[in-house]
Image (spheres, grey):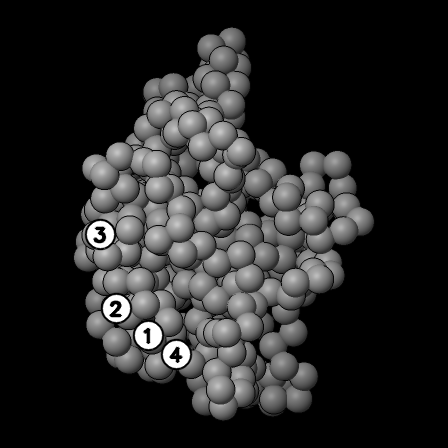
Amino acid sequence: MAEDYKVIDVDVHNEQNDVDLLPYLAEPWRSRVAATGIGYAGSGYYSPVGVMKKDAIPTGGGKAGSDPDLMIKQLVEGYNVEYCVLTGVVYNISTTHDPDYAAVICSAYNDYLIAEWLGKHKAFKGAMAVATQDPYLAAREIDRIGGHPDIVEVMISSAARAPLGQRLYHPIYEAAERNGLPIAIHPGAEGGGSSTAPTAAGYPSRYIEWHTCLSQMFMAHLVSMVCEGVFEKFPRLKVVLTEGGIAWLPHLMWRLDKNYKALRSTVPWLKKMPSQYIREHCYLTTQPIEEPDNPQHLIDLFNMIDAENMILYSSDYPHWDFDSPSMILRRLKPEAKRKIFYENAKGLYHL
């Protein structure tokens, strides 16, 4: 596949050591990070396979994904990737309690991303990070660097204190629309810090439960964004649901449309069927793709949601569940592959 089609990878995690952000931090934040590290409030679930691909660890040491040259060799050159969107991991700072600290860390990371990564290769494009604790600070950050030519989206965490459609978050969407940038939502710290429980039933016991149920967060956030009128209020806004799965979308759209027919008076600002807003404004990423025993079932599901126009390829490099572009979606028709692996992202990000 990689030999036949150009590829745009929309979820590539460039990592950094905490000390890498020190030159981009003012006091008192610099001393705090130097003494204790950034201090992400993670989910706390143990994974026996770890998080990273072992072959993505630089030979000279450091975190997997922290060496631009190795990333270029393994991913960009290895899979004919024309562009890759660097998504980092700093969005997880949204689970910490201090909104000012979270905003400062995101600003430092964004400056680091621009200075240390985006000029390393023409394939590198950046997803700037903002924290959701204080949406007005997030909006200010979007306006600060949203015009940079290599910044192509705004990344926020799906680990949040409230559903992401609620109006307290609207300054973020207003700023993203103003700067012509899509919003990407990414999981990673659900249940940690100030985040809500990672499942609708509460806190599971094990990583396999937590990892499997991450799609619940995306369902809740998407229903919230539609029903709160985000896409009516911000008609040019696009949203990328990154690393949240795909197979759940058909039944969610069916159920939401069915309920809307009887309950539309509770959301009088909506002018279209809920599923139409989703089709017009939202994208999902391939990784982690659900892979049924019968491949035809996945194709049937894709047909239900017009997937070839809504899905973007993502590898999740350098994480353990990396999806090679040469190994997934082999049974799709060539025109569908071309859209998913390249054309959809090229249009969304104006590449």
Cα distance in 3D space between marks 1 and 3: 18 Å
In this rendering, which labeled residue sits more in front, label 1 or label 3?
3
Q: Is residue 345 visible?
A: no
**Helix, strand or loop for disc 2:** loop
Contact between labelled residues 4 and 1, with CB atoms less than 8 Å apart: yes
- Of badges 2 and 4, nearer the viewer stands 4
Q: Residue at x 65, y 74 (%)?
A: 39
Which residue is painted at 33% across and 75% down in the image? 73
Q: Say which quarter of the image contains residue 63.
A: bottom right
Q: Which residue is mark 4?
A: 70
User: Relative to the observer, which residue lies in front, 142 or 250?
Assistant: 250
For disc 1, the marked residue is 72
User: What type is the residue that disc 1 sits on?
Assistant: Ile
Lower sequence index among marks 2 and 4: 4
Residue at x 47% of width, y 10% of height = 261
Q: Which residue is mark 3?
A: 5
- The answer to whether one can see residue 313 in this image is yes
Residue type at tag 4: Leu
For badge 2, the amino acid type reads Ala
| Near-viewer residue (79 or 100) | 79
Secondary structure under tag 1 reads helix
- The answer to the question of whether label 2 and label 1 lie on touching residues, with beta carbons closer than 8 A, is yes
Q: Earlier in the sequence, mark 3 or mark 2?
A: 3
* Quadrant of res 112: bottom left
